[in-house]
Amino acid sequence: MKIVVGLSGGVDSAVAAYLLKREGHEVVAVFMRNWHDSTGTLHGDCSWEEDADLARMVARKLEIPFEFVDLSGEYRRRVVDYMFAEYEKGRTPNPDVLCNREIKFDAFVNVALELGADKVATGHYCRVLETEGVFRLLAGRDPGKDQSYFLCGLSQSQLSVALFPLGNMLKSEVRRIAAEQRLPNADKKDSQGICFVGKVDLPVFLRQKIAPRKGDVIEIFPDFYRNLPQPDASDYAALSTPLKYSPSDGKKIGTHDGAFYYTIGQRKGLNIGGHREPLFVAAIDVETNTVYVGEGDAHPGLFRKALFVAAGEIHWIRKDLAMRAGESRRFDLRIRYRQPLQKARIEMRSEGLYVLFDEPQRGITSGQFAAWYSDEELIGSGVIQ
């Protein structure tokens, strides 16, 4: 079988390529250049040239062909421009989910197919199993590295060409193999930050298109929540709607450079002292350019019992298991990478689906992805409103 491996310069994709060659496949390495603008990136964390050199060295060590492809135009249009637009609306997008759906398993797959590939492989820690013509996306065996969440936007056709050689492995095993085979990047640290961009100073990065604008930081005190009317347990819309604050609900304690630079649950970057516990962002309002904060990570404004995904934002990996309006079903959910799975019930309605958690969740954030699982299998996902 001819398999194109997305060789990133990191140890995971390098070991994936090694394993596939050891199995006897015809392996071709392709390096994607998707970003080369250093604006806002932290020095040393996003050098595509260094990554490309490491990828070439790995390909040479494994004696497999090496190709280079520039997808930076597609990446900017389909991922980065979307990021800017979402932040400007006061939402917090997940570029890694978009990168996998739009670039690695779409634009890159097209390149691989032009090279005659039967399959495309990456170094993700997850698994794909085919059962009677249905492709199932399963969590990786390593609980600390499972990356199925980042692939929650993939379709059946995308999964049909995907291979994940590391899905049944622990990260420690991957490091051991890289060292034993003396791969050039065996000791390279795992990448962090935005997919293909790296670790960034987000406000500086966003200022490329979103100009700073001074606004107020308002502290909301716990007493505010004690007298709030509690929605009825059957009023899913009310339960899932974030609280709307006004400046009169709290006290001004500082200023900021733009509400769109902040996200729910954020602690760093506020630069306001005088509190015993750290301040966390509880809400932002881009229309009034106001940031609302609360003291301590147990602040009641950080927690919500439910969320909503609009009908047009729902994605079923398993279309054969898609819910119909009026159905109710229990799933395990996560609303961010590496969050432990949370018990919840999904209520499907014509306008979308409501997720009702057994326990209140901290930092439910508009623009992020909720992903729901049945046992180890990722069944569907959606963008949180």
Image (tube, rainbow, N blue to C red):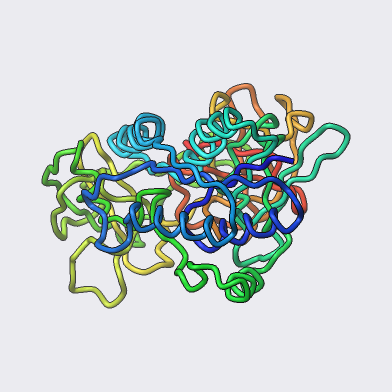
Q: As drawn, is 382 to the left or to the right of 316?
A: left
Disc count in the image? 0
Residue drawn 56% across and 47% down?
65
The image position of residue 85, as x and y in percent, is 31, 32
User: Is 344 above or below relative to 313?
Assistant: below
The image position of residue 293, as x and y in percent, is 29, 57
**373 or 139, which lies in front?**
139
Residue drawn 16% across and 52% down?
256
Regarding residue 84, the answer to whether it shows in the image is yes
Residue drawn 32% across and 56% down?
47
The image position of residue 145, as x and y in percent, is 60, 63
The image position of residue 48, as x and y in percent, is 35, 52
**166 or 376, which lies in front?**
166
User: Is 86 above or below relative to 142?
Assistant: above
**Which image quadrant is residue 112 in?**
top right
Q: As drawn, is 85 to the left or to the right of 327?
A: left
